Image: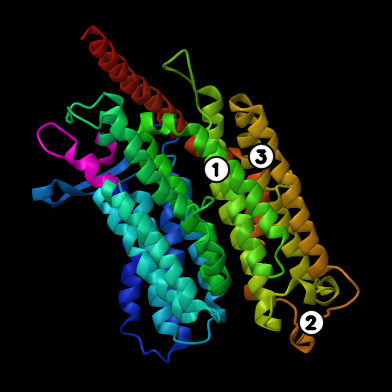
Amino acid sequence: MTPEFLLTAIIFLPAIGALVLSIIDGKAVDAIRFMSLGVTIATFVLTLMLWMQFDYETAGIQFEVSKAWIPNWNIFYRLGVDGISLPLVVLTSLVSMLSCVASWSINKLHKGYFMLFLLLETGMMGVFLSLDFFLFFVFWEVMLLPMYFLIGVWGGPRKEYAALKFFLYTLAGGVLMLIAMLMFYFNSGGTEHSFNLIELAKAASGTSDHITGFLSPSMQITAFVLLFIGFAIKLPAFPVHTWLPDAHVEAPTPISMILAGVLLKLGGYGIIRIAFPLCPYGAAYAAYALVAIGVISIIYGALAALAQTDFKRLVAYSSVSHMGYVLIGLGVWKITEGTTVNSDMWLMGINGAMFQMVAHGISSAGMFFMVGVIYDRVHHRDLNKFGGLMGLMPLYSGLAAGLFFAGLGLPGLCGFIGEIFVVLSTWNYSPLLAIIAASGVILTAGYILWALQRVYLGAEYKGPHKEDITRMNAREASVAIVLLAIAIVLGVFPGIIFDMMHASTSALVESMKLGYQHAADLVKAAADTQAMR
């Protein structure tokens, strides 16, 4: 299999699996489950093959696919992968596979559920592998409908409200992204307009051979604000995060795993892939706001988690807090002497943000899964009605403690690496913001340890359905063990991720420096011309 065909197979194999499911008898539940699992396993194997063929030393796009799709508008079926997208592609296939295993707990409309599940995986893969803005936008919107129905049909008591809220928030972000996309398209001068993300990034840095015109510095600021709001909704960042707790609480456990493990990463990836390289001047203009919003998200999310009595809502607010570190790491770049970008600490921040996305994808998926395991037995999530599970479910409690400690950021587990890199890079940017961000670790320890105390420790279980509390079965244990093992491996050997992405993140920083300096030169030239008049 050629590397170029491999990218297409990774995206569309789940969709083909959904098509095959459509002709299977809906009553053949086991056949539907194992067929879906087989498709997710095959997709995961394909992403591992892509990883094995990936060249760590190459900073640019690898395995690029470019086929004309809508020639009249210069829209291409353009795919590719680099060190920024590859970790998230592998993470997506892994979390999808484990979520499919967790989907054995779904007890109605199995055929429809697994078809939508596989279509959702196709949409997520398409976003991470698209290099044409129009194609990126199509896959971004494709994810909306499967997730809407997966929450709205298979969710909890307030599922319709949560699904509609998710849909409207994401749709609003998509509209803002569409406006920015049209700004780029119609302002890309030269022989023809373009949606090519690589060429648009080169145009922003002043190094494109094909695009001779581009957004002015002031228009870059406008476009960046539009893109940032759209991506911040998905991240999610304060104050556009309010859809997340409702969606998480009402979604079934496997969908919560995907929502936290993958969908939140789409916001960070969109900022890195589109907003930053296409609007370097706008990104520099808004850098302090990004860091400040990230710090607010960390503290607000942690304080909100401390106030929760619903186990799943606590984990949902923890995601708001943890993704704040991603936003901080992306924003900590300083401009000195007018046009010079201080890039060393910023590179550390971007690497930390990328690692945090992967680490959070593992730990948060694990935490939501562990909440789902006990909910399937006792049918409630009230933290004040648990206690004593360590004695009743020792394996479950031990695995849960490990995954929650990974989310806490305990050294030796995956959550520690990204957070410490981000905080260190923030110190160079603003010691005050670094101190506030670091204090979020204390609050995180507070709500994690308090939750563990109320749920797993204590003399005896205080809630209903005690007679239904049984030990983990092999299927449940396998999901938790895999996630905890990966959390330990990434915590001990973070170079697995850093080596993969270092060349690409370094190239991004250099491109951003060129782009900012190019725009700053235009601003200076315009000011000089105005002064001469």
Q: Residue at x 50, y 63 (%)?
A: 243
Along the horizontal axis of the image, is 378 left or right of 161? Answer: right
- Alpha carbons under labels 2 and 1: distance apart: 39 Å
| Residue 284 shows up from this direction | yes
The residue that label 3 is drawn on is 437
The dot on residue 335 is none
Q: Which dot marks residue 293?
A: 1
Query: Hey, which residue is sitting farthest bottom in the picture?
Result: 27
Horizontal side of residue 211 vs 424, given as left or right: left
Residue drawn at (55%, 37%), measured in percent from left and top? 291
Question: Where are the magenta residues, as a range?
Answer: 180-199
Q: Position of residue 315 (x, y in %)?
A: 65, 62
Inter-mark Cα distance, 2 to 3: 36 Å
Q: Which residue is mark 2?
A: 463
Rate crowding at label 2 as few (under 14), some (14 to 19) or many (20 or more) other CA atoms within 10 Å.
Answer: some
Q: Is residue 198 above or below residue 247?
A: above
Q: Quadrant of the C terminus?
A: top left
Q: Nearer the viewer, mark 2 or mark 3?
A: 3
Q: Is residue 147 above or below residue 107?
A: above
- Check disc 1 and give the amino acid type: Ile
Q: Which badge, 2 or 1, is on the more N-terminal residue?
A: 1
> Which callout, 2 or 1, points to the residue nearer the camera?
1
Residue type indicated by callout 2: Gly
Residue 434 image point, x, y percent: 66, 33
Front-most of 306 and 464?
306
Q: Write the residue at 26% across / 53% down.
A: 135
Quarter of image, res 439? top right
Gap in angstroms between the C-alphas marked 3 and 1: 11 Å
**Residue 98 placed where, x, y %?**
54, 66
